Amino acid sequence: MPIEVNGKTLETDEEGYLVNLDDWEPAVAEAMAKEDDLELTDEHWEIINFLREYYEEYQIAPAVRVLTKAVGKRLGKEKGNSKYLYGLFPYGPGKQACRYAGLPKPTGCV
Amino acid sequence: MSDKKQFMFLNRRAPYGTIYAWESLEVVLIAAAFEQAVSLAFIDDGVYQLVTGQDTTGIGMKNFSPTYKTLGDYEVRHMYVDKESLEARGLTADDLVVVPWEDWETEETVDNIVEVVDSDQLAELIEQSDVVFSF
């Protein structure tokens, strides 16, 4: 299913992840969230931006466990738990937030 | 914890040219995500996997060497490098990636889990493992 963003048609795989990582821009996350009936807040963006930085540095999308710990360390302990992250991304912080961030699905994620 | 097994991943091939190095890394990430005790060893041309400053633009493959730096976050505790293999290729520990490890609850830290060992030590470590994967 391709996704329409700012008049451009971007290719995605069968699960909705961007095929070409370089296609990403913030409007991609907004468009994907809209399809899920989700309004992106600053708290969502904090996680999305964190994921993009992590990918830039290590070239992979982190496993949920790694994401949870890293968020706790960088953004504060009250955010480094699955309750907080699932509250923001009900379809799973690994899957949903990585998709919005334009990253591939995390390795080992089923 | 009796259900936690000692996994050892042997990496013996150069990072590119075959898919082995990348496949090994993916299995390591999966095994670690399932909270197993994971160690890696780099032998023969496998030592090239950890060399810093890799540039893959000429071969059109993704440079996955930065991924090794996050293995400490995946609770990998040991990355052993065979001393003889390193020396035979004119390399030293200074040519290799640094991988920090930190226990985020106790704040115990290890600056670098990459460790150069000789073949006797390596044989011992393999002997002690419950499961050995060779790539």
Image: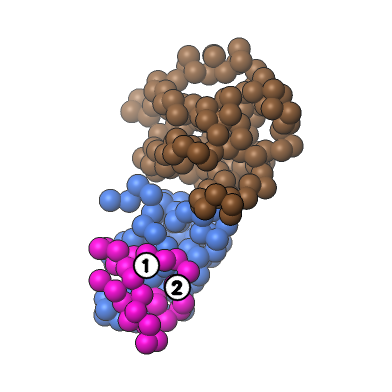
**Which secondary structure, mark 1?**
loop
**In the figure, B119 relative to B113: above or below?**
above
Please name the color used to draw chain A: blue
Q: Mark 2 belongs to which subunit?
A: A
Q: Amino acid at mark 1?
A: Leu
Give the residues in magenta. A1-29
Image position, residue A26 (x, y; %):
45, 78
Residue A38 appears left or right of B52: left
- Which quarter of the rendering shows the C terminus of chain B? top left
Between B28 and A11, the one nearer to me in the picture: A11
Type of amino acid at the residue the image marks with label 2: Trp
| Quarter of the figure with the N terminus of chain B | top left
The answer to whether any part of residue A84 appears in the image is no
| Front-most of residues A46 and B45 | B45
Identify the residue at image location x=73%, y=28%.
Answer: B90
| Mark 1 neighbour density, 10 Å: few (under 14) some (14–19) many (20 or more) | many
Q: Colour of chain B?
A: brown
Report in which chain the residue with disc 1 lies: A
Question: Residue at left 25%, top 71%?
Answer: A1
Give the image location of residue B106, x and y in percent.
56, 44
Q: CA distance from mark 2 to mark 1?
A: 8 Å
> Is A106 part of what is drawn in magenta?
no
**Does residue A19 show up magenta in the picture?**
yes
Q: Which residue is more in the foreground, B56 or A27?
A: B56
Label 2 close to label 1 by CB (< 8 Å): yes
Residue on which disc 1 sits? A18
Q: Which mark is residue A24?
A: 2
Closer to us: B131 or B106 = B131
